Image: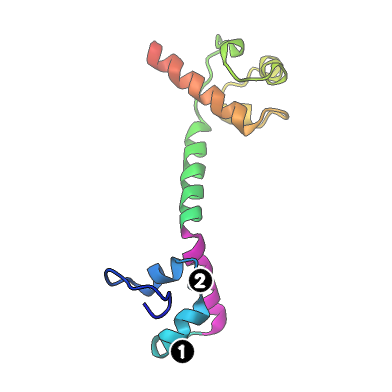
Amino acid sequence: EEASGQALAREYSMYDILKRPEVDRTTLAAVEEKELSQFDDVVLQQIEIECKYDGYIQRQKLEVDRMSRSETTVIPDSFKFEGISGLSNEVIQKLNEHRPSSLGQASRIPGVTPAAVSLLAIALKRTVQVV
């Protein structure tokens, strides 16, 4: 309560309190001086960074996991890129020229954007569901 200036409805860990935008390590250290005085400021700074960015880091890890799973998603030889709504003519041309065999290969073609790869992944998923 002291650190954020707001009454807390329940008990929170220092980690959870430090996640709040209005609380930083110096504010928390002033309130919890006894517990935090044993740590060097560099350590407290690193903990603060991890607390503040934890949600972003977790989302990024999920995105990396999703992308690595899609890396091996096979694109059938007979797949028609022209039927994918939202793909630019340039991207369709590049995909037809290179004929990637997986989403991973498609993502590494110069000029094929991450958004285009996402559209391709959705189209492939729909194709599998229809079959």
Residue beneath disc 1:
37
- Does 124 sit above or below residue 23? above
The residue located at (57%, 79%) in the rendering is: 42
The residue positioned farthest toward the left in the image shown: 10
Assess whether residue 1 is covered by the magenta stretch. Answer: no
The residue located at (61%, 33%) in the rendering is: 114
Nearer-the-camera pick, 76 or 18? 18
- Does 22 sit above or below residue 76? below
**Image side of residue 13 versus residue 125, left or right:** left
**Image side of residue 6 versus residue 67, left or right:** left
**Image side of residue 11 versus residue 128, left or right:** left
Nearer-the-camera pick, 121 or 2? 2
Amino acid found under the numbered disc labelled 2: Glu
Residue beneath disc 2:
48
- Does 7 sit above or below residue 65? below
Measured as percent of width and height from the top left, residue 68 is found at 51, 38
**Image side of residue 130 versus residue 120, left or right:** left
Magenta region, residue range: 40-54
Measured as percent of width and height from the top left, residue 49 is found at 53, 67
Mark 1 Cα shell of 10 Å, populated few (<14), some (14-19), many (≥20): few
Amino acid found under the numbered disc labelled 1: Ser
Q: How is the image coloured?
A: rainbow
Label 2 vs label 1: CA separation? 15 Å
Name the element at disc 2: helix
Residue 85's quadrant in the figure? Answer: top right
Mark 2 Cα shell of 10 Å, populated few (<14), some (14-19), many (≥20): some
Measured as percent of width and height from the top left, residue 35 is found at 39, 86
Name the chief secondary structure element in magenta: helix
Q: Is residue 91 something that shows in the picture?
A: yes
Name the element at disc 1: loop
